[in-house]
Amino acid sequence: MKFEKLRERAVETAALYDRHNVAAGRREWSPEDFMMGFVGDVGDLAKLVMAVEGRREIPDARAHLGHELADCLWSVLVLAQRYDVDLPAEFARMTAEIERYLAENPPATREGGEAG
């Protein structure tokens, strides 16, 4: 699925949650609410990664990993939309900065010279 379709789907799903919350007598989620949900999802993702790597016991952790990654992506997409952030442009800028930094700062060898 292309980025624009992912973003559209994320925003549509957030709107469904908003309608559901209002119908249940609750308020729509604010960006702060989405951020707190994201933090919770990142915590769940961390636990699953630990389980997949053998540091925790969670039954079928590997099977749940994709879902939790998708939860995190959904929150990021919705937050980017709520704050009018051009995520593809920011991603391209960020990765270009990393690449430039790494090219300009080669690792040193243990003897103090540059790695080759």
Image: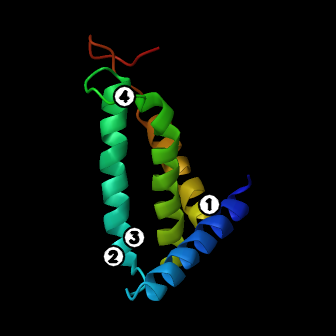
Tell me the crowding category of disc 1: few under 14, some 14 to 19, or many 20 or more residues within 10 angstroms, Cα based. few
Nearer to me, 74 or 114: 74
Position in image of residue 116 (x %, y %): 47, 14
Task: Name the secondary structure under disc 4.
Answer: loop
Three-letter residue code for mark 3: Phe
**In the drawing, what numbered circle is on residue 88?**
1
Q: Nearer the viewer, mark 4 or mark 1?
A: 4
Q: Earlier in the sequence, mark 2 or mark 1?
A: 2
The reply to whether the C-beta atoms of the residues labelled 3 and 2 are less than 8 Å apart is yes
Q: Earlier in the sequence, mark 3 or mark 1?
A: 3
Q: Which residue is mark 4?
A: 59
Pick out the residue farthest to the front: 24
Where is 29 relative to 88, above or below?
below
Q: CA distance from mark 3 to mark 2?
A: 5 Å
Q: Earlier in the sequence, mark 4 or mark 1?
A: 4
Position in image of residue 105 (x %, y %): 40, 34
**In the drawing, what numbered circle is on residue 32?**
2
Q: Which residue is mark 3?
A: 34
